[in-house]
Structures are given as C-alpha cells and as structure tokens.
Amino acid sequence: MYPLDSTSRLAGPRARRAGRLNRGGLVALTAALGLTLAACGGGKGTAGAQGTGEPVAGDTLTVAEQQAPPGLNPGTADLGFVDFTMLSYESLFYLSPAGKVEPALAKSWKYVGTGNRELSLTLRSGVKFADGTAVTADAVKASLEYAKKAQGNQAHYLTDATITATGPLALTIKLAKPNPILPTLLTQSYGIGQIISPKGLANTAGLTPTKTSQGAGPYIYQPSDSVAGDHYTYTANPAYYDKAKQHYKKIVIRIVQNGQTAVNAMKTGQIDVYKGDYTSAASAKAAGMSTVGLPVILQGLSLIDREGEVSEPLGDVRVRQAINYAIDRDAVTKALLGSAGTPTVQTVIKGGDGYSADLAKEYPYDPAKAKELLKAAGYADGFELPVLAATFVGFDTMAQAIAGQLAKVGIKVKVTAVTSITSFVENQTNKKYPAVSGGFTEEPMYLEGLDLFMPGSKVFNGFGSTSPELTDLFNKAAAAEPAERAKLDQQMQEYLVKNAWFAPVAFTPVNYYVRPGIGGVQVSAGAPFVSPLAIYATK
C-alpha cells in the first residue's frame, strides 16, 4: 500500500528514488517504512509535551537517530534527514510543535488575492549567514531556485513556482496551480525551505559531512568534531539573530541502530532523546524514560485497481466496501500491534485535515454485510485477490492477517511479498497487482492528494485512478480559504471512505523516548515529528 520512510518519514528517512517516479509519493513511502519501524510495538505514544518545566540554558543535547544521512545538503535532503540540516540552515518559516507556522527568516507573509497562487513575504533585516554575508531576497531566491532544480524529493513542490525578488528583503512566489500550504512546505520540516548561502550554492558539492555548513541557522555544523555515519556535531552560531532559540551550546546527533544500545546509553546520560523502534519500548519504559508520539503511520490495503483492469471485482464499489466490512480492525490491530495501534477507516488521524468523527463509524465489522454486498455485485462465491506486500516493517504480516479476515467472506487473497523497496515500488506501478499492503505517513489532505490519491501520485495510485468529483473537490480546496478548505477536506475524505478506495486497518505511532530533565519534546496533528530545534533543558 503506502510505504513510508526508509529514508523518509516512517521508518527513518524516506525510501529512495525508484527510477523517476513521483517524488512526493516515494518520499511518503520511504518515510512510512522508517516511521512504521520506529512505531510498531512502541506503546500508544502520548501526544503533547514531555518535560514542560521552565527552560534553562543547556550545555549539550544528544539526540539519537537510526539512520545516517547520505549528505548534508538541504536542497536535496530526503524528509527523513531534515533534522540533520535544520539546525544549521534557517528556514523561511518555523513549524511549531503545535503545528502553527511562525516567522523565521521571513518576518511576515500573506497570500495575494484569491486562489492561493501568489505568496508575498518580507524578510527580517540584519540577518547574516554564518559566513558573515547578509540574508537578502536575492540570496533566498537563489536558494529556492536551486532547490527547485536540484531534483530532490521535495523539488516538485516548487516545480510551477516563479520566484521574484521585489526588493532587498521582499519576495513573491507565484504558482501556476493553487497551493494552500506553501508556507508549511517552506518551514524547517522540509529541506527546500532551509536557505543555503550564496557561498554554499557556489559549491553545492561541498555540502557534505566533511565541510562546515553554509546556512543562517542557530547552529553551525562542525566537521572536525563529527564522524559521518556515527555522530554529527553542531555548535551555537554566535551571529544568530534570536538567542532565545539557542537552547544549547552544542547539539550532537548520534546514529544508533540498535534500540537496546540506545536505551543503555540513555540510562547513563549519553543520549537525551531517541526516536526509538519497537524493540526498545519495554526497556525504555522500565528505565524511566518518557514516551511522546502520535499514531501517524497508516497500515492496511490500498485497493488501487479501482476500475477493475486486473481484478474485475475491484471495479465495483460494493466489492471494495465488502472488503472494508470484512476486516475486524480491532482484532487485527490488537493481534499485530497491541496497544501501539489505533484502528481506523480513514487515511487521516483524529485532529488532522479532513478527519470526521462521523466517518470514523463507517465499516463496523460485519461479515454478513460483506457477503450481502458481494452477492449483490455478483460474487456470492467470492473471488481471488492478488496482493502485493513487502517483507519489511511487517507489511507482509499485515497482508496475511487481512487475508485471514477476507477468507471468511469468500475472498481468497494471494499475497506476493517482495524483499526490496525498488521492487515494491515498481510492482505498485506496473498494473500487475490490484491491491497493495503497505504504509503511508499521514499528511495534510493537500499533500495526501499529491502523494496518495490524485492521478499524479504515481507510486501510490499506480493505476491512475481518477474521479471528476474528487478532482473538483481537491482543486476547490487548494484554492480555498482555511475555513472553506476544512469543509472540502472532509468531503474528500468522505469520498475516499464511502467509495472504498482504501481498506485502512490501523495507525501506529512514531515514538520518541526522553530522559528526565528534557522539555520541548512535543507533537501534534499538525506537527507529528519532533524538531530538535524545539528541545530544551529544564530545571
């Protein structure tokens, strides 16, 4: 179905490019892989904040990640590695732990006119890059243009952008198509919004772990005190414009792939925060660590052959609805994920864009209803359904669990599990398999459209499913004001659920394990991943 971060956001950073497929979807796929790995069995993460005591000046913060970045270039960084670049490359905007877009390099901004096609922004005055050169509109324009052309996994968000410096500290970004969340995409959570200095752009090949960073962030990357693949060290930037955001003198990101090793290091104070996997959950809790996380990794079936090209039955909405009624989500979730899973029939989490409490009641477990729908569609005796799965992150196990559920109503699932991400992605797009078991990182509905269900989302919409109604809702939402967009987002989610484009089963959390005395480790529906910039020491 939808894999997340293996180099992206589910499992760690998102999965790599498979050919030249839709980058947003692939990023979401990779992220899902990484995040799912980090989530399963981790216990039901607690949303909100850990350590909310009064902040104090900290000496050294050590954060552990499971995977090392291939480089330190924010213009090409996968989403799963933006933590390594956001410390030293200030972004245009800042996404707070509450999910609110706040000023960073840009002190003010607004959409011009209607339709969310032109963003006007004004930069702070007097801000300098770490090399001493001024942050100007021309410098920001050059960095954005580079990110646009660098063909990283986020470049497609700027593909139709025309960027103009309208003054020494003023820019406009004009878009061919509406984008209601462009400020969010230019925060620290996305590499394209992290601004590279002119000196850095003059030698982008030098944006590596062996060279000093070339940004305007609160910290400066120190290659002499770092070892690529092992640890990455950042020291406070003496020229940074907002000292209140520099919570530590030094921040170190360590690479620790083994969960128990990380927990042991936390016990002795060598690690303060760890994005843990399921193997470390019990020991972290026993060691007195706090857990913060939200269920943002979606697992289940993606019924991608919605016109019945390969599997004729899936072309009938009643059959897809029958599949949803036939899955006992509570039982499957409890059996596979325990308390770490949150059953769902929607592709968004509670509190997220498009979520509906009413929709949450759709598809209660009802095998009799499933059989009734199958009979009405002409499949009273059931049918065979080929399903693609992957051997990583338990996607194949989820597929087998679903197969057991569907067998009870006569649907004979034949699972084919592959062992590589490349093969997994290719087989989602070659129209060989009508359904896929995988994972997807929950996103705002606008991004879900681009990455998951609109015709252009090549990886996760491998058959190119189209719907005039859904496309119309998406286009209207993209151009709408926030209040109206919220209603349209719900209507899109309602379409997906009632037309059974997917058969979701459960969300699993990305968990962060935190030592006592650490604050700022917070998550929300609008910002489900912890930013190291927000972490601080407490009394």
Image (spheres, helix red, strand yellow):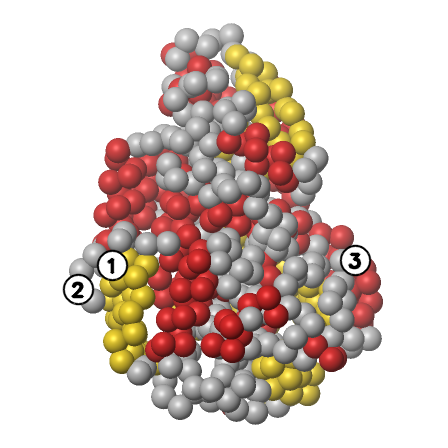
Picture layout, residue 453 above or below residue 153:
above
The residue pinned by badge 3 equals 258
Crowd rating for badge 3 (residues with CA inside 10 Å; few <14, some 14–19, many 20+):
few
> What is the C-alpha distance between the residues marked 3 and 1?
46 Å
Badge 3 marks a residue whose secondary structure is loop
Amino acid on which the number 1 mark rests in the picture:
Arg
Looking at the image, which residue is at 48% across and 58% down? 150
Q: Are marks 2 and 1 in contact (CB under 8 Å)?
A: yes
Mark closer to the chain start, 3 or 2? 2
Count of numbered labels shown in the rendering: 3
Crowd rating for badge 2 (residues with CA inside 10 Å; few <14, some 14–19, many 20+):
few
Amino acid on which the number 3 mark rests in the picture:
Asn
The residue pinned by badge 2 equals 113
Q: Nearer the viewer, mark 3 or mark 2?
A: 2
In the rendered image, which quarter is residue 146 located in?
Answer: bottom left
Q: Position of residue 216 (x, y in %)?
A: 50, 81
Q: Position of residue 398 (x, y in %)?
A: 63, 34
Residue projecting furthest to the front: 202
Mark closer to the chain start, 3 or 1? 1
Amino acid on which the number 2 mark rests in the picture:
Gly
Point out which mark residue 394 bears: none
Point out which mark residue 117 bears: 1
